[in-house]
Image: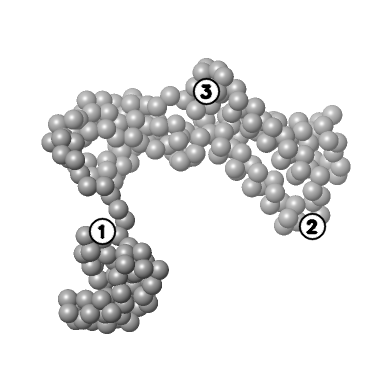
């Protein structure tokens, strides 16, 4: 039995063995390639998504390929995925093999070059991620971790963190999303009823405060203090 070679027909066991071997080959390949390849996904999730997409696509696009192999392979991969998830929850050692530990790229304002090499990312990529978080100075970063899903978690030094009402022990007002009362030049009568306002009030407010009419309004919102925000077509 040689399931590595092409055959016109292969047995069910051959399909099972092919799926198992392909799964572990893909898993090893992804781990060797590094986390940037699979950003936003864990290694095992990436492998399953990639392989299932190919398995299902081939018989749908080629009428000469039967569904038997795809069905068997899909069942085997689903089984391996469930087992893999179960085992990673039970054994921390296996979890480290599949997901690895977060890599500290920056610690107390100092960049770790060895960590950059381990994560296989460049200093330019690291700086771009810092800019996305509005961090212009590396020394402001207390800790930056390269996570198992390929993202970077950034924690600022406490003295550079933005002030919040809690800092001054001030109780802020509860957040409430403004109501959309006009959208694309049309009045949302349901929201008007919710805030207990009349259409005549809205038309009058638009005319007096914004010198406009309803059909010229792209968006109009109102907050809990009855502050009306109007955005016109431009």
Q: Mark 2 points at which residue?
A: 63
Front in this rendered view, residue 14 or 194: 194
Q: Name the residue under label 1.
A: 224
Q: Give the quarter of the image for residue 205.
A: bottom left
Identify the residue shown where x is 69% and y is 46%. 55
**Local crowd size for mark 1, using a 10 Å CA cut-off: few (<14), some (14–19), many (≥20):** few
Identify the residue shown where x is 30% and y is 60%. 178
Residue 97 visible in this rendered orientation of the protein: no
Mark 2 → mark 1, Cα distance in angstroms: 61 Å
Front in this rendered view, residue 192 or 42: 192
69 vs 52, left or right, is: right
Residue 7 has which mark? Answer: none
Mark 3 → mark 1, Cα distance in angstroms: 48 Å
130 vs 83, left or right, is: left
Q: State the image coordinates of residue 174 (x, y, percent, origin top left).
A: 26, 47
Q: Give the quarter of the image for residue 153.
A: top left
Q: State the image coordinates of residue 84 (x, y, percent, origin top left).
A: 61, 27
Q: State the image coordinates of residue 211 (x, y, percent, origin top left).
A: 19, 81
Residue 51 visible in this rendered orientation of the protein: yes
Front in this rendered view, residue 213 or 65: 213
Q: Mark 3 points at which residue?
A: 95
Q: State the image coordinates of residue 64 (x, y, percent, origin top left).
A: 81, 54
Q: Give the quarter of the image for residue 29.
A: top right
- Taking 2 as reference, is 60 above or below it? below
- Helix, strand or loop at disc 3? helix
Quadrant containing the N terminus is: top right
147 vs 3, left or right, is: left
């Amino acid at each position: 039995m040689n399931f590595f070679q092409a055959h016109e027909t292969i047995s069910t066991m051959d399909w099972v063995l092919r799926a198992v071997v392909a799964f572990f080959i893909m898993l090893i390949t992804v781990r060797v390639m590094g986390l940037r390849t699979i950003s936003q996904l864990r290694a095992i999730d990436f492998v399953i998504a990639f392989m299932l997409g190919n398995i299902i696509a081939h018989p749908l696009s080629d009428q000469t390929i039967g569904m038997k192999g795809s069905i068997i392979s899909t069942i085997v991969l689903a089984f391996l995925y469930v087992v893999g998830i179960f085992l990673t929850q039970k054994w921390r050692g296996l979890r480290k093999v599949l997901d690895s530990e977060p890599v500290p790229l920056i610690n107390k304002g100092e960049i770790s070059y060895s960590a950059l090499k381990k994560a296989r990312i460049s200093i330019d990529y690291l700086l771009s991620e810092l800019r996305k978080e509005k961090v212009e100075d590396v020394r402001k970063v207390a800790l930056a971790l390269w996570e198992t899903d390929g993202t970077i978690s950034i924690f600022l030094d406490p003295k550079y963190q933005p002030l919040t009402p809690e800092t001054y022990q001030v109780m802020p007002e509860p957040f409430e999303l403004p109501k959309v009362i006009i959208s694309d030049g049309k009045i949302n009568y349901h929201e008007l009823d919710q805030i207990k306002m009349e259409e005549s009030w809205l038309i009058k407010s638009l005319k007096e405060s914004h010198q406009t009419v309803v059909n010229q309004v792209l968006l109009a919102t109102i907050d809990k203090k009855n502050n009306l925000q109007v955005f016109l077509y431009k």
